[in-house]
Amino acid sequence: MGSGGHTIKHRSHSPCMSSTLCSVSFSDPEGYMDSSDFPPQPLGSFLECTYNVTVYTGYGVELQVKSVNLSEGELLSIRGVDGPTLTVLANQTLLVEGQVIRSPTNAISVYFRTFQDDGLGTFQLHYQAFMLSCSFPRRPEAGDVTVMDLHSGGVAHFHCHLGYELQGAKTLTCINASKPHWSSQEPVCSAPCGGAVHNATIGRVLSPSYPGNTNGSQLCVWTIEAPEGQKLHLHLERLMLQEKDRMIVYSGLTNTSALLYDSLRTESVPFEGLLSEGSSIRIEFTSDQGQAASAFNIRFEAFEKGHCYEPYIQNGNFTTSDPTYNIGTIVEFTCDPGHSLEQGPAVIECVNVRDPYWNDTEPLCRAMCGGELSAVAGVVLSPNWPEPYAEGEDCVWKIHVGEEKRIFLDIQLLTGQLVVMAHRPSQGGCYAFYVIAVRLSVKHTQSHKA
């Protein structure tokens, strides 16, 4: 049983009622609070008791209700202590035997008040210290956080996805305090306006996270240098420029280098990619749009001369006969569920010994507007998922299953209107989906008829 000290004082509230105040302090790591520790007071007296528990910094106080039997009108309040602030954690209306209450700091206070006209209520509370911890740090958008320990001294490591930069501390430490906290605010990940990459391997160039200066204009320049003897390949996964915005790509580090792409000189986007002539590339982006920002996502990678670059396909995957992509390498592409291959073949080959290149462009995996589906399970997505598509499109998907089978639809996301019509012909079953939606995600599976 933990030790503690207490004092009892008497004062008068009225000519007919005396008041008894008591204060008990505990500092041991474990002990009991028991109402029977105090001698009985005269009937008609008014009793107020405060029990305060303070443990080592970095530890909290855990209370367990061993017994509680209060009379009507009696008050028993358990309060968290944070400096001068008291926060009610539980009171007599919520307390039950066996209940556990934990303080958020290294101190807790229990307040008991009674009028002893009909006898004193009883309670017994057991307390013990437990190690406090920091709350789990907030994960940055477009990034991640790893934490090995949330207790005092624990470290949280933050990092950003490709193309983003960390704004703030890379690591935070859980500080030992009456209420443990992280050493500073969690960092954020943002896409910078320009930058320089040396000894490039794989990375991304993204549209800036923040607008330009006060008049909305912006000039961003990225320079990318691969190791000597290597080339660079740019894959334009997304390029949506506003009317007056401009992007220029040079095969070199200056704006006098050979021109690879200029958005004002060509209407089509080179989704097949861009190849540097040497080991460096310069990307310039200018904007006068202010808040009406353009959006782009460009993936770059360095590759050895005498080899083809590593292919890339969004919303899909590929297999290769040679992970070094030497001459003669065969690559086969497949799409994720709900997507279909288009604008390129499913198989490409690395050709030309003198200056290797792929014999065709990488295909695209896109969510189509409608189609015939007969697989046992699959996904139906709105066209161009996850991007929105143009208004006014009516898409029909027909799912055919075998005879004596049904279709289970799991609608995971729907914004707009979805109409499902069931049709059962003489052989098999068919469900047709008439979809007018901005975003749609539906999973379907076959099941045997009950």
Image (cartoon, grey):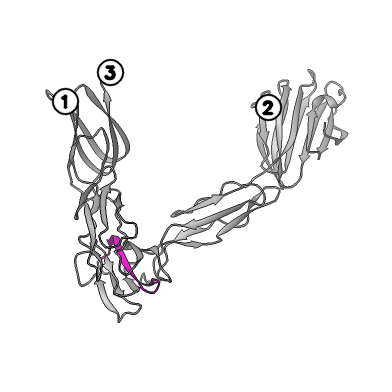
Contact between marks 3 and 2 (CB within 8 A): the answer is no
Q: Is residue 16 visible?
A: no
| Residue type, numbered disc 1 | Gly
Q: Which residue is mark 1?
A: 428
Residue 2 left/right relative to 238: right
Marks 3 and 1, how far apart at CA: 15 Å
Mark closer to the chain start, 3 or 1? 1
Tell me the magenta residue range.
218-242
Q: Give the structural element (helix, strand or loop) at label 1.
A: loop
**Where's residue 190, x and y in %?**
44, 61
For residue 162, above or below residue 304: above
Q: Which residue position holds label 3?
A: 450
**Image height of 282 relative to 421, above or below:** below
Residue 262 tag number: none
Q: Quadrant of residue 161?
A: bottom left
Residue furthest to the bottom: 256
Name the foreground residue: 374 vs 187. Answer: 374
Image depth: mark 1 or mark 2 in front: 1
Q: Is residue 42 left or right of residue 78?
A: right
